[in-house]
Amino acid sequence: MKKSQKPYINKTMKSTEEKNEEFLLNIVHDIKSPIVGINIALENINIKNEPLKDILNEIYTVNRHNLEYIENLMEHYSFKTGKYNLQYEFFNIVNIINEEIVALRFLIIEKNLKINLITSSDNIPIYSDKQMIRQIFLNLFTNAVKYSPNGEEIKIEATKLKRKVSICITNHLNPDSKKTTGFGHQIINEALLRLNGKINHTKNKNKICFFVDLPTE
């Protein structure tokens, strides 16, 4: 019996698939730039007219969600193809948490949310890829803000243990929230696996807690 030619066909199909994905990635990257530019402009506009301010805030919120989705698509492709090169360095995880909270300040203010950050120290060093860690926590905080009812508290606890840092993010859920994990959560799982970290969560009727463990060395 002659050997099947399937491997050759699969290889050809894979090559075509990769080309299509790269083409889509280039389009997504081109779409990202103007969205970032628009949001930077909106952040620096001081509007006193309340109706106009509400409209601009709504545009900012929609753009923020679109930008989050685009970044998830780009990262998913990078992880899938192994093209993302990890850049390890020492940095303070508390600074990263604070910076990503500030990045969401407009959404936090809009929903009148209280952020309660509790840390075992103002300086908790870890050795990891700073950019990937930023994206992980931006994604987690964005979901916490998005699914929290107005006026609620989001609690973030960062604790330095013997050889790891444990970060817990707890928020209440809107009664009609049906989906709190998804494509972004898949990205986080893949990223943490590469960083020798892990994530798990618990959920009851009206509250969800995400637990992230990161190695310190």
Image (cartoon, helix red, strand yellow):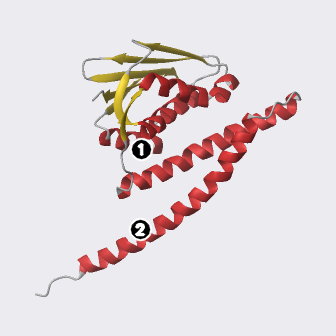
Instruction: Describe the element under mark 2 as helix, strand or loop.
Output: helix
Check residue 18 in the rendering and tell me which mark sits there, or answer none: 2
Name the residue furthest bottom. Answer: 2
What is the distance, in whole Å, between disc 1 and disc 2 at their CAs?
Answer: 19 Å
The answer to whether residue 74 is seen in the rendering is: yes
The answer to whether residue 180 is seen in the rendering is: no
What amino acid type is highlighted by mark number 1? Answer: Ile
Residue for point 36% across, 16% down: 159
Q: Residue 17 in the image: state x and y as whole percent.
A: 41, 69
Residue for point 61% across, 59% down: 30
Q: Residue 130 in the image: state x and y as whole percent.
A: 43, 36
Q: Residue 153 in the image: state x and y as whole percent.
A: 56, 16
Above or below, comparing residue 120 to residue 70 in the picture: above
Question: Which residue corresponds to mark 1?
Answer: 187
In the depicted view, which residue is nearer to us: 175 or 188? 188
Judged left or right of residue 204, residue 64 is right
The N terminus: image quadrant = bottom left
CB atoms at circles 1 and 2 under 8 Å apart?
no
Name the residue furthest left. Answer: 1
Above or below, comparing residue 98 to residue 138 in the picture: above
Above or below, comparing residue 181 to residue 201 in the picture: below
What amino acid type is highlighted by mark number 2? Answer: Glu
